[in-house]
Image: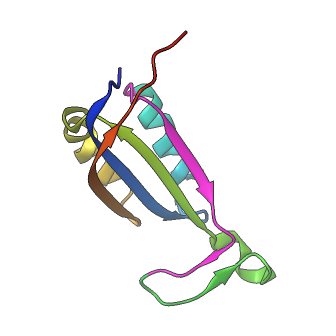
């Protein structure tokens, strides 16, 4: 369980068109994080963006709308992130993973 103090924030950038064995990569990553006890994760779908190939993908361009940006964010202990990082890298082969040290405040539950 995540507690107040130092933590690691991980952001994974993907395309919603990226698939692994017929399943969207972001779905596989979210399932992996859940099964491995990560404190919590959020998936956000962008309306436009571009990646390393420098091709703009936007929701208003019908033929490219299946390659919109996806961002997965989660925060957990440095130890938990280190533990799952090798498998996360394998699952996100086509994406980018950003990690940064952060501080969190977990309010008391009432």
User: Which residue in the rendered view is the most extreme toward the top?
Assistant: 110
Q: Is residue 65 above or below residue 45?
A: below
Q: Quadrant of residue 46?
A: bottom right
Side of 97 where 13 appears, left or right:
right
- Residue at image position (41%, 65%) is 95
Could you tell me if residue 72 is visible in this image? Answer: yes
The residue under the point 54% across, 63% down is 18
Q: Quadrant of the C terminus?
A: top right
User: In this picture, is 74 found above or below 22?
Assistant: above
Q: How is colour applied across the structure in the image? A: rainbow
Horizontal side, residue 51 vs residue 16: left or right = left
**Closer-to-camera residue (35/45):** 45
Examine the image and state in which quarter residue 27 appears: top right
Nearer to the camera, 40 or 7: 7
- Residue 1: in magenta span: no
Q: Quadrant of the N terminus?
A: top left
Residue 7 image offset from top left, x and y in percent: 27, 39
- Most extreme residue toward the bottom is 54
- Residue 40 magenta: yes
Left or right, 95 with respect to 54, comes to left
Q: Is residue 66 depicted above or below 1 in this figure?
A: below
Q: Which residue lies at the image location 35% right of the left edge and 37% below the top edge?
A: 104
Q: Which residues are magenta?
A: 36-51
Q: Which residue is nearer to you in this view: 74 or 36?
A: 74
Total number of numbered labels? 0
Vertical comparison of 1 with 92: above or below: above
Camera sees residue 21:
no
Q: Can you give x and y, in whole percent of width and height, for residue 86 in the image?
A: 23, 46
Residue drawn at (19%, 40%), measured in percent from left and top? Answer: 82
Judging depth in this view, the residue of 95 and 72 nearest the camera is: 72
């Amino acid at each position: 369980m995540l507690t107040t103090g130092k933590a690691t924030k991980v952001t994974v950038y993907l395309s919603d068109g990226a698939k692994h064995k017929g399943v969207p990569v972001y779905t596989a990553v979210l399932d992996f994080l859940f099964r491995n006890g990560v404190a919590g994760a959020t998936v956000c779908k962008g309306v436009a963006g571009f990646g390393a190939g420098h091709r703009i993908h936007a929701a208003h361009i019908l033929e490219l709308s299946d390659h919109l940006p996806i961002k997965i964010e989660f925060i957990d202990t440095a130890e938990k992130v280190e533990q799952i990082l090798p498998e996360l890298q394998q699952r996100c082969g086509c994406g980018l993973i950003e990690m940064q040290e952060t501080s969190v405040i977990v309010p008391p539950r009432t």
